[in-house]
Amino acid sequence: MSEYQYYEFTAIDRPLTGRERAELRSLSTRADITTTSFINTYEWGDFKGDPRTLMERYFDAHLYLANWGARQLMLRLPKHVLDPATVAQYSQGDSASAWTAGKHVIIDLHDEDEDGADEWDLDGHGLLASIIPVRAGLAGGDLRLLYLAWLRCVQSEDIADDEPEPSVPAGLGTLDAPLIAVAEFLRIDPDLIAAAAAGSELAASSEPTAAQLRTWVVGLPARDKDAILTNLITGGDSHLRNRLLRRYRDAHPTDASTPTAARTAGELLATAADLRAERERRDAEQRERDRVRRERSAAAARQRHLDTLAADQSAAWQRVDELIATKKPREYDTAVQLLVDLRDLAERDRDSGFQQWLADLRAAHARKPSLLERLNLAGLDT
């Protein structure tokens, strides 16, 4: 089995120029390079480029996956839509870090498989596409991605147990598909997410409604509306919608988050452990109920089968003789199973004649060692 490394970079805010694509081509002759992406898979060797440098110069999103357990996700956003100070509140460990490069802030999230288990059935294609929508949400003021990054640090024990949690965003209990994809990719403990979600459970959604936005827009100063329309028409701000959503959230903090008493990383881990124990208890109870139901269903089916057999036992004994007469191992197996059924029927109905029938059968076929061995293995001895 060979190694597997998957690199994918995506440009979102602007396409790559011809010169930039040529620069990228110098890093790999095998990569699939387009005006918006760079994708390469390695089964031997390593990528010559530095993902941090590529993110600073060309791309807005990056995903890395290796079959020895390494996973990495990077996102780049303009500083005017995502405040680096806000990012710093949540990036408090080795598993979640951030830095600024020119006009951008870059978030770096990663996870290493602590057990060191190799994964051989991996395919990175499509993973980044399922995650990329979180970037727009983050630019619009949805901070759930950053909180998940902080939880990744808690889970990796990058953060001291007495470290208080940062501000809890709304909607942790109702993650959308892209955020779920992030949590699964970074292998964030679902029980830890559930423990944290208790701090935002009163806010069912992080998205303002159309009616709330309409009321807010009506109340904006005329000059602000003029600037918004101008930017919309000229296309001068590719993050216009996200900036407006962030401005709305800043003006309505109670719509964007639920104030709670700050919990510590250790308290969240303890709550997650309690939730896990309770979930495992419920799962064990459900498995036991399923087992009992299966056994009852099998027992009922067994009784129906024996009822059918009881209707004509003489035909069953005749069938046993016919199967044995073929002298074929496969037919011997069928005959033995039928004899087991007849034995169980006799025990159920307290019919003492079965043992005599079995003794007569063994005597009649005493020179068939293969058959006798099968009878003994099935417990059909006298």
Image (spheres, rainbow, N blue to C red):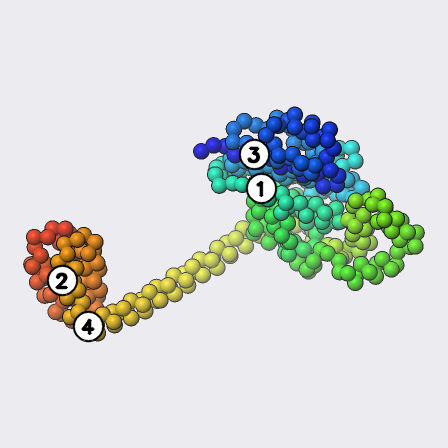
Judging from the image, what secondary structure is the residue with disc 3 in? Answer: strand
Pointer 1: residues within 10 angstroms few (<14), some, or many (20+)?
A: some
Q: Is residue 3 above or below residue 183?
A: above
Q: Earlier in the sequence, mark 4 or mark 2?
A: 4
Residue drawn 13% across and 62% down? 321
**Distance from the alpha carbon under mark 1 to that under mark 4:** 61 Å
Q: Nearer the viewer, residue 205 or 127?
A: 127
- According to the image, label 4 marks what residue? 312
The answer to which quarter of the image holds residue 125 is top right
- According to the image, label 2 marks what residue? 321
| Image location of residue 299, percent across then percent down | 31, 66
Judging from the image, what secondary structure is the residue with disc 2 in? Answer: helix
The answer to which quarter of the image holds residue 171 is bottom right
| Image location of residue 128, percent across then percent down | 62, 43
Q: Are marks 1 and 4 in contact (CB under 8 Å)?
A: no
**Distance from the alpha carbon under mark 3 to that under mark 4:** 67 Å
Judging from the image, what secondary structure is the residue with disc 1 in? Answer: loop
Horizontally, is 143 left or right of 335 in the view?
right
Horizontally, is 358 left or right of 20 in the view?
left
Q: Nearer the viewer, residue 120 or 269?
A: 120
Q: Are marks 1 and 3 in contact (CB under 8 Å)?
A: no
Q: Earlier in the sequence, mark 1 or mark 3?
A: 3
Q: Amino acid at mark 2?
A: Asp
Q: Earlier in the sequence, mark 2 or mark 1?
A: 1
Q: Quadrant of the N terminus?
A: top left
- According to the image, label 1 marks what residue? 125
Q: Earlier in the sequence, mark 1 or mark 4?
A: 1
